[in-house]
Image (cartoon, rainbow, N blue to C red):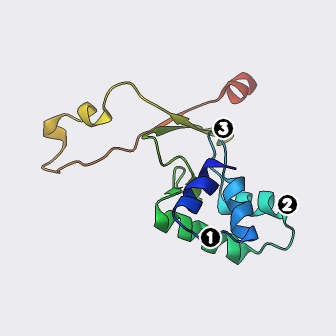
Amino acid sequence: MSDLVTRLRQRSWRMTPQRRVIAETLDGAHVHYTADEILERAAGRMPEISRATVYNTLNEMVALGEVLELNLDGRSKRYDPNVEHEHHHLICEGCGATKDVHTVGNPMDWLPGDERHGFAVTRASITFRGLCRECAAAS
């Protein structure tokens, strides 16, 4: 059973076959699929699954706090099931591959006091950009 399925069951979330397929699609390390990618993968296992079911299920998982909704590239939303460990993201500017990264030190310390402009900063979300090994080799 996937981590996400286990977490959803612990919350007594009704686990229909469609919801289970969607949750299992989101299982794994470095998962940052768009809704369309989730639909495509889920439909491979359950051809009758609908786009509306995928979107509604993702919205519910986000509302429960069990999946993060990210907009890392300014275009499409991506869904990240890694909600249990504070992390940041590394994105390939060539192919769009996205990886979770765990930084050393507290990113809250990286913003000097005079750059906070009076904000009471509560959290940081950092995105590192570059080229993955394959894209760097191709350029």
Instruction: Determine the residue positioned at 63% across, 39% down.
Output: 29
Q: Position of residue 51 (x, y in %)?
A: 73, 73
Residue at which label 2 appears = 45
Q: Is residue 102 visible?
A: yes
- Using the numbered discs, state the Cα–Cα distance from disc 3 to disc 2 in whole angstroms: 29 Å
Per the image, label 1 sits on a secondary structure element best described as: helix
The residue type indicated by label 3 comes to: Gly
Label 3: state its secondary structure. Answer: loop
Mark 2, Cα crowd under 10 Å, few <14 / some 14-19 / many 20+, is: few
Query: Which of 41/127 is in front?
Result: 41
Question: In the drawing, what numbered circle is on residue 57?
Answer: 1
Label at residue 94 = 3
User: Residue flagged by tag 2: what amino acid is it?
Assistant: Arg
**3 or 1: tag closer to the N-terminus:** 1
Instruction: Identify the residue shown where x is 66% and y is 68%.
Output: 15
Q: Report the mark closest to the observer, 3 or 1.
A: 1
Which is more N-terminal, label 2 or label 3?
2
Taking the spot 75% from the left edge, 64% from the top edge, the residue there is 39
Q: CA distance from mark 3 to mark 1?
A: 30 Å
Mark 3 vs mark 2: give the one in front: 2
- Picture coordinates of residue 102 (x, y %)? 46, 31
Where residue 119 appears, as percent x and y from the top left, is 17, 51
Can residue 36 be spotted in the picture? Answer: no
Q: Amino acid at mark 1?
A: Thr
